[in-house]
Image: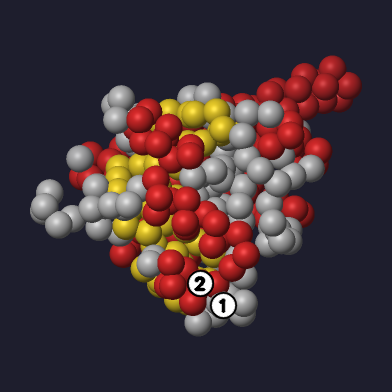
């Protein structure tokens, strides 16, 4: 690493967060004076970029709002540090927790996620229940226990993080994608319990719209990295439905119906599609390696 190259880059996506951003940046500069602070002004109208620039941060400005994920991608592309920390600008993430993330990262992890460790850390009961469901579903798909799938507070090896930038969506689903991608790639992911404060200002997340997007992202990444996790249960469902329908029609009409044949054939086709997808995924990973 070049002597003038910072060891740490801190990327902060911000949209109309000038009030909370001032205190956060001042705390980060005090605790990490050598760190590269990158604020991505995602189309703010309240002078967020100017506030960050006055405090001494590098500002990457999007002339219009492109989304939280797009801001993270823009910031990580500009980062020069060996380690990148991503955190929110809304006052929820404490600057004092950055050191804890870095300490755990130095113990052999490729990424460490700040996991909200209590019901109080969730914005609402609905968000708490939704996040619990996402965590369970993604844990099953990846084969690893995921404690907080949607946390935007994390530290990671910059090179590893950049491997998956092309997969990250532009919206609020970027934590979902990067977490599952790291797990499926075989990288070491750790979780650190953190308390988050009540955010300042209004959240930009829309529960119904972004909730559906989170689910689609989970299935998209699972299909990309572990296709049989998706295709095998569907194939099994069609198989037993076909067998069940055959048993019923045999006892009632003593015949094998077209519906039973259709469901059994569908079961075989879905399984074969999953098998081919799994082989394609293996080839892609072997080429990357």
* SS type, badge 2: helix
- Image side of residue 238 versus residue 84, left or right: right
Residue lying at the far left of the rendered structure: 2
**Do tag 2 and tag 1 residues touch (Cβ < 8 Å)?**
yes
- Distance from disc 2 to disc 1, alpha carbons, whole Å, reads 6 Å
Residue that numbered label 2 is attached to: 51
| Circle number at residue 47 | 1
Question: Up-down: is 67 above or below 117?
Answer: below
Question: Up-down: is 238 above or below 209?
Answer: above
Quarter of the C terminus within the rendering: top left
User: In the rendering, at what x and y percent does residue 46 appear?
Assistant: 62, 77
- Image side of residue 170 versus residue 136, left or right: left
**What residue appears at the point 61 percent right and 52 percent down from the top-left corner?**
91
**What residue appears at the point 48 percent right and 37 percent down from the top-left corner?**
97
**What residue appears at the point 18 percent right and 55 percent down from the top-left corner?**
5
- Image side of residue 251 versus residue 236, left or right: right
Nearer-the-camera pick, 159 or 45: 45
* SS type, badge 1: loop
- Image side of residue 249 versus residue 160, left or right: right
Badge 1, how many Cα within 10 Å: few under 14, some, many 20+? some
User: In the rendering, at what x and y percent does residue 119 appear?
Assistant: 73, 31
**What residue appears at the point 44 percent right and 72 percent down from the top-left corner?**
54
User: In the rendering, at what x and y percent does residue 191 appear?
Assistant: 48, 29
């Amino acid at each position: 690493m070049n002597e003038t190259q910072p060891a740490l880059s801190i990327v902060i996506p911000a949209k109309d967060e000038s009030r909370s951003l001032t205190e956060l940046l001042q705390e980060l500069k005090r605790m990490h004076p050598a760190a590269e602070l990158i604020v991505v002004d995602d189309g703010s109208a309240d002078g967020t970029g100017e506030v960050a620039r006055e405090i001494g941060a590098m500002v990457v400005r999007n002339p219009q709002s492109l989304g939280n994920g797009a801001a993270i991608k823009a910031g990580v592309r500009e980062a020069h540090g060996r380690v990148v920390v991503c955190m929110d600008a809304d006052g929820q993430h404490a600057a004092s927790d950055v050191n804890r993330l870095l300490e755990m990262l130095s113990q052999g992890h490729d990424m460490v996620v700040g996991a909200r460790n209590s019901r109080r850390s969730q914005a609402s009961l609905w968000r708490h229940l939704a996040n619990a469901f996402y965590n369970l579903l993604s844990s099953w798909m990846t084969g690893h226990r995921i404690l907080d799938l949607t946390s935007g507070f994390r530290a990671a090896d910059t090179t590893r993080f950049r491997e998956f930038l092309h997969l990250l969506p532009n919206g609020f689903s970027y934590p979902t994608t990067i977490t599952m991608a790291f797990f499926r790639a075989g990288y070491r992911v750790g979780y650190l319990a953190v308390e988050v404060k009540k955010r300042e200002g209004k959240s930009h997340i829309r529960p119904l719209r972004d909730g559906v997007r989170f689910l689609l992202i989970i299935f998209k990444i699972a299909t990309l990295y572990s296709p049989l996790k998706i295709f095998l249960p569907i194939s099994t469902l069609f198989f037993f439905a076909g067998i069940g329908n055959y048993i019923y029609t045999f006892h009632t009409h003593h015949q094998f119906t077209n519906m039973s044949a259709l469901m059994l054939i569908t079961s075989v086709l879905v399984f074969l599609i999953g098998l081919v997808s799994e082989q394609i995924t293996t080839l892609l990973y072997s080429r990357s390696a």
